């Protein structure tokens, strides 16, 4: 495997027939003679565009002539250009070699701040081109050789090695695929390297993920350093698994645990698996259905105690072990709508009151790399340790960084008084790991971490914030152009800086702000991460009032999907997109123009067969309906059931546990359950997790009783699904059965 990193030359004479052109081309040919690839450009063009090439090149050669120093004016502008360009590169990349190429007198004109960033000054005609070429290529090679982090490097070496394997996987470096036609297709699609690098843990020189040795350990160590943690463990089964590992390493049956009510289902699975007794912290919600933060007061120890007192199972657990603190706190750091918490304020409140603080940062692995998020994420440079509490953060490397699916990591910050016992921790790690981890995922954890090393990582985060703000500004501009006519809004503060990324303060949720709809929040406690954008469709106000007309988001996102734009999640009157480090201008511009097309088609009330042909094939009953009319039908259905209020209230309604979640689950495994029709559910305790999509957040957990609001919601969903198939609300946990031609819905409840 030979990596492709050309040397980039920028010289305005690169194609000229003068001596300077001859000189630079001679150098280029000499480098090519050494087997290097060389690309010549005659001007910087757009400086920052050109500086992007830093990720593809192995070195830059910037040429500068004595002519440019003939007058003070030309000198000044030449130096300024050079400085800007070098700064653009160094903003992203500290290490790539930059050479200046010029005439002998030139070097004396170059100020120190520029010289400092250079790997050398090449004097034209002073040495042979061959000699200079070798010198440059040595530096370039040493730079590219230093790029690969430990595990990825070892894996590449191993795959290059060409050794025959007798171990699993059985496809033997991809050879098995070549023996069948469809296997050939697979092989051609994924390529030889992916299959050669798919090895098993018998390969000693790669180290072991499961006991953290060799190059794997070195890469975890490297990631721990980059993410400011004492320990880092790569996980190849997603943060769903990382969360279970953290829990199983600390929580035992009967422990009281304090959990964000809107946590990911993996946390609820962990509650069931460990036999913990949960008390829940309730986040705010606004009537758009967006999840706000858990108010600061909810976290106060006296309030947590109140919750324990109000829950018979927690009370009993505490009576049994009055000396024990709650074992763990888990919060979703960055809610699904992008709201984050000030971790220093939480530490101050909870350090010493709860044994372990766990931040589920599945959506927040980027925050540590930019001061924009100062204190609004779990672990960071210059952040103090807790005195007593151990801190964990779990990251879905694959969600916002450059990890492949299921790439995840667990970060640990020890306290002043507690060290992590790695041996004990690993017992839980092993419990949830496959014994055949996917090495490509490990490599992507390794590479994703290395990519985030400042300054490169900081630049990447800054770029995604900048693009997110550009998108928001562009949406406002379109809105202003439409005047009183409708347009989509992006949820966020009223003011956005005109230029650049602004500061954290711009995105803080202030207690007196109207835009968020979460009421009286504690000062400085929460911010909205601007890279997470909720686009709000017309029809519903933040106070939950329905307008006359409305455009439910499910139609918009279906429209977008048929136009090649797939969004992250869809709510009633909002949908969610993210500006990850993979974002490009082209991507959000495509979204913007698709939204404009939607508006156009909506305003013209075009028939559905014309605008959503694929959808109409599946649901022909909509063919003749106009887009506007269909929007209105769905809007009216939502409105007549006051569904925004119902969904908000059902999440906020007090949940009554009838038994411990693990006990309810145990009854299900023994089939001590009834399959209950939804009209009969009130008062019954569910045996399963009940999760409506949207928003995809569990509503009831095993052992909790159905209340009136939830039953009302399920009845609405049934009616709605019958009336408007294709736009139905998905509810995981419901059992759907066709009884004599009518569709009936059931939930498995404990007896
Ligand atoms: C996605 C997600 C997870 C699970 O992560 P996977 O990597 O998909 O397993 C856990 N917690 C939160 C908050 C998530 O959003």
Image (cartoon, rainbow, N blue to C red):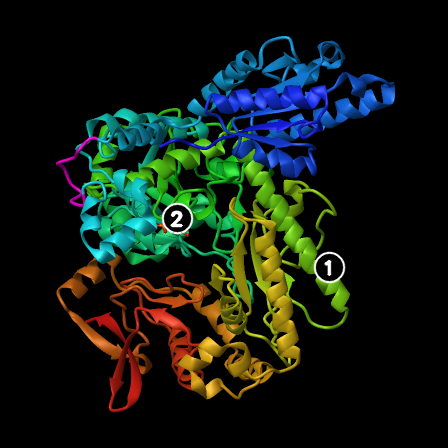
Q: Tell me the number on the disc at residue 305.
A: 2
- For the C terminus, the image quarter is bottom left
Membership of 91 in magenta stretch: no
Left or right of residue 73, residue 295 in this image: left
Residue 493 in view (yes/no): no
- For the N terminus, the image quarter is top left
Left or right of residue 338, residue 40 in this image: right
Span of residues in magenta: 163-171
Q: Considering the numbered disc 2 on the image, is that residue within a helix, a strand or a loop?
A: helix
Q: Is mark 2 within 8 Å of ligand 1?
A: no
Q: Give coordinates of residue 667: x percent, y percent.
A: 17, 64
Membership of 165 in magenta stretch: yes
Q: Give coordinates of residue 198: x percent, y percent.
A: 25, 40
Q: Give coordinates of residue 565: x percent, y percent.
A: 52, 62
Task: Determine which residue is flagged by label 1.
Answer: 477
> What residue sits 27% from the left and 69% below the top?
685
Residue 720 in view (yes/no): yes
| Vertical placement of residue 418 versus 486, above or below | above
Q: Residues within 10 Å of mark 1 (few under 14, many from 20)?
A: few
Left or right of residue 374, residue 614 in this image: left
Quadrant hosting residue 538: bottom right
> What residue sits 22% from the left and 57% below the top?
181
Pointer 2 with pointer 1, Cβ within 8 A: no
Q: Residues within 10 Å of mark 2 (few under 14, many from 20)?
A: some
The CA span between labels 2 and 1 is 49 Å
Quadrant hosting residue 389: top left
């Amino acid at each position: 495997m030979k990596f492709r990193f050309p040397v980039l030359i920028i010289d305005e004479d690169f194609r000229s027939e003068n001596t300077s052109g001859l000189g630079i081309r001679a150098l280029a040919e000499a480098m090519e003679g050494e087997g290097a690839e060389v690309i010549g450009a005659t001007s910087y063009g757009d400086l920052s565009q050109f500086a992007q090439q830093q990720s593809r090149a192995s070195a830059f050669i910037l040429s500068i002539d004595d002519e440019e120093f003939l007058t003070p004016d030309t000198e000044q502008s030449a130096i300024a250009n050079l400085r800007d360009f070098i700064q653009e590169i160094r903003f992203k990349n500290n290490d790539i070699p930059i050479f200046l190429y010029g005439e002998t007198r030139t070097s004396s004109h170059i100020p120190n701040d520029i010289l400092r960033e250079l790997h050398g000054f090449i004097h034209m005609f002073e040495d042979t081109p061959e000699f200079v070429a070798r010198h440059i290529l040595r530096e370039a090679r040493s730079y590219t050789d230093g790029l690969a982090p430990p595990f990825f490097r070892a894996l590449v070496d191993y795959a290059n090695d060409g050794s025959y394997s007798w171990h699993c996987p059985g496809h033997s470096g991809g050879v098995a695929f070549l023996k069948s036609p469809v296997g050939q297709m697979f092989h051609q699609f994924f390529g030889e390297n992916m299959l050669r690098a798919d090895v098993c843990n018998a390969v000693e020189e790669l180290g072991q993920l499961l006991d953290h040795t060799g190059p794997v350990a070195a890469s975890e160590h490297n990631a721990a350093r980059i993410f400011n943690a004492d320990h880092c463990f790569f996980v190849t089964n997603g943060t769903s698994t990382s969360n279970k590992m953290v829990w199983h390493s600390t929580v035992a049956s009967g422990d009281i645990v304090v959990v964000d009510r809107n946590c990911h289902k993996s946390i609820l699975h962990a509650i069931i698996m460990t036999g913990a007794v949960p008390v829940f912290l309730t986040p705010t919600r606004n009537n758009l259905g967006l999840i706000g933060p858990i108010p600061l007061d909810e976290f106060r120890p006296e309030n947590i105690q109140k919750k324990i007192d109000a829950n018979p199972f927690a009370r009993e657990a505490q009576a049994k072990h009055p000396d024990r603190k709650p074992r763990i706190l888990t919060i979703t750091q960055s809610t699904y709508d992008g709201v984050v918490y000030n971790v220093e304020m939480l530490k101050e409140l909870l350090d010493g009151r709860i044994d372990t603080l766990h931040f589920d940062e599945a959506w927040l692995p980027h925050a540590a790399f930019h001061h924009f998020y100062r204190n609004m994420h779990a672990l960071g440079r210059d952040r103090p340790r807790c005195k007593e509490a151990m801190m964990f953060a779990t990251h879905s490397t694959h969600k916002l960084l450059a990890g492949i699916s299921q790439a995840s990591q667990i970060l640990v910050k020890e306290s002043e008084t507690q060290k992590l016992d790695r041996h004990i921790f690993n017992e839980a790690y092993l419990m949830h790991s496959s014994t055949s981890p996917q090495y490509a995922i490990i490599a992507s954890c390794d590479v994703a971490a290395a990519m985030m090393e400042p300054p490169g990582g900081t630049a990447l985060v800054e770029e995604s914030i900048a693009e997110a703000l550009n998108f928001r500004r562009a949406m406002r501009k379109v809105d202003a152009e439409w005047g009183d006519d409708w347009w989509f809004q992006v949820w966020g503060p009223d003011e956005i800086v005109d230029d650049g990324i602004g500061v954290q303060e711009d995105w803080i949720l202030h207690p007196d702000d109207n835009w968020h709809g979460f009421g009286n929040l504690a000062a400085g406690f929460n911010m909205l991460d601007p890279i997470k954008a909720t686009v709000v469709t017309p029809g519903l106000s933040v106070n939950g009032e329905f307008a006359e007309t409305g455009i439910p988001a499910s139609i918009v996102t279906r429209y977008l999907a048929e136009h090649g734009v797939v969004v992250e999640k869809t709510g009633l009157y909002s949908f969610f997109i993210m500006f990850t480090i993979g974002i490009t201008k082209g991507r959000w511009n495509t979204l913007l123009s698709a939204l404009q097309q939607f508006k156009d088609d909506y305003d013209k009330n075009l028939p559905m067969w014309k605008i959503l042909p694929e959808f109409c094939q599946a649901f022909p009953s909509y063919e003749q309906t106009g887009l506007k009319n269909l929007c209105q039908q769905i809007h009216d259905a939502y409105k007549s059931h006051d569904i925004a209020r119902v969904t908000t209230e059902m999440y906020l309604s007090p949940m009554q546990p009838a038994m411990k979640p693990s006990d309810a689950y145990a009854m299900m495994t023994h089939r001590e359950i009834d399959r209950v029709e939804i009209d009969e559910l009130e008062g019954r305790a569910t045996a399963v997790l009940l999760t409506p999509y949207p928003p995809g957040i569990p509503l009831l957990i095993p052992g909790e009783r159905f209340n009136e609001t939830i039953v009302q919601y399920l009845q609405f969903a049934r009616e709605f699904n019958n009336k408007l198939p294709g736009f139905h609300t998905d509810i995981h946990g419901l059992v759907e059965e066709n009884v004599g031609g009518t569709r009936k819905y059931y939930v498995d409840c404990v007896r």
